[in-house]
Amino acid sequence: MYSPSSEDIIKHDIEFDAEGICKICHMHDKFEKNFTEDGRKKLDKIIEEVKEDGHGKKYDCILGISGGCDSSYSLYLLKEIYGLRVLTYHFDNTWSTTTAVSNIQKMVGALDVDYYCHVADNREYNDAEKAFLEASVSDQNIVADLVYPTIGLQLMEKYDVNYSFEGHSYRTEGTVPFGWMYMDGKYIESVLKEFGNYEEYKTLPVMTADFWLEQLRKRKGDRIRLLYYFDYDKEKTKEFLSEKFGWEWYGGHHQENEYTKFVKTYVLPRKFGIDKRFVEFSALIRSGQKERDEALKELETLPEVESEFLEYCKKRLNYSDKEFKSMMDRPIRSYREFDTYIPYFLDNIDILKELADAGKLPSTFVEKLLIRRDRMLRVTSSQI
């Protein structure tokens, strides 16, 4: 499915072996072996450990919930099937759709779980996201992506919870090419310092690397990807959630949030040449949930964006038509031009590998970091 081109401004950074199989496909196969094979047995062991650790505490685990399909189904599994005492939480960046909010209320209410919602100041959030648009980097929407786990770790610290779960499935979402997106707290701080308009973003907590590493060492399992252990079928799951809870579909992957929809359907494909449907469709094809010819047909055209929706987003971000066009036409920059925690992570790579092996952080983080390190070493050696 992936179509790397040397002419692309954004590097797809996908390597192929002698048989023409890409690294991301190899990652998929590795996940199948490490997680999905005998997945129920492996997950049962984790659940036993979570229950034992939660004895005498108010909660066994926490789970971030967006109102989307994957996190909603994960909540059902954790509470209804495995009987865990779950604290759910949501980061409201003020762009959530009414459908997403309704889905959260339905799931939390029906399953009778405690729920915490962290609401951003909409001016702060809009300014932070606009800073990344003005920076002209492809790493869009990472503010929300990093605030979410920061809130999660803060809640784990507050309630002495050692396990958190995350609603992500490699079988339906895939893994983005390494040149498409990067995120860390120092990178966000660097962009906001240059392009943001606030001295402090009080409602947007973003963890430092030291805090993250400290918490990973203290905790026993951060953002365990529950759905990795299942032969997860998204369409069947959507039907199940709808029938049992009155849950509603919101039109597209990650489109339960309007800002994510704006970035994914308009900014990324039209400015950066990044269409994340390639990733999602590739994963669905690999897991037998979509036909390749059907996917290629859909990818012949860019994602549809209604003019009213685009105008709404421009107004919320305080863009005039001229300013918006200027932003879209601006030359593309890379995260490498800003400060990041990559040197820190590489200095601590052995610790991070141990933590990943122990199930304390998603293995994809280390996988991608090692690939970045290998790329950096090759570039350095070629310049000698």
Image (cartoon, helix red, strand yellow):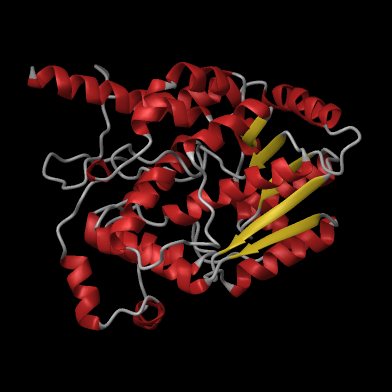
In the rendering, at what x and y percent does residue 182 appear? 36, 42
The residue most toward the front is 199
The quarter of the image holding the N terminus is top left
* Residue drawn at (65%, 69%) of the image: 101
In the rendering, at what x and y percent does residue 19 appear? 27, 18
Residue 237 left/right relative to 97: right
In the rendering, at what x and y percent does residue 75 appear? 73, 49
Residue 93 left/right relative to 128: right
The quarter of the image holding the C terminus is top left
* Residue drawn at (20%, 51%) of the image: 333
User: Which residue is at the front of the view, 248 or 119?
Assistant: 119
Q: Is residue 303 visible?
A: no
Up-down relation of residue 120 to residue 30 (above or below): below
Residue 114 left/right relative to 288: right
The residue most toward the right is 56
* Residue drawn at (41%, 79%) of the image: 316
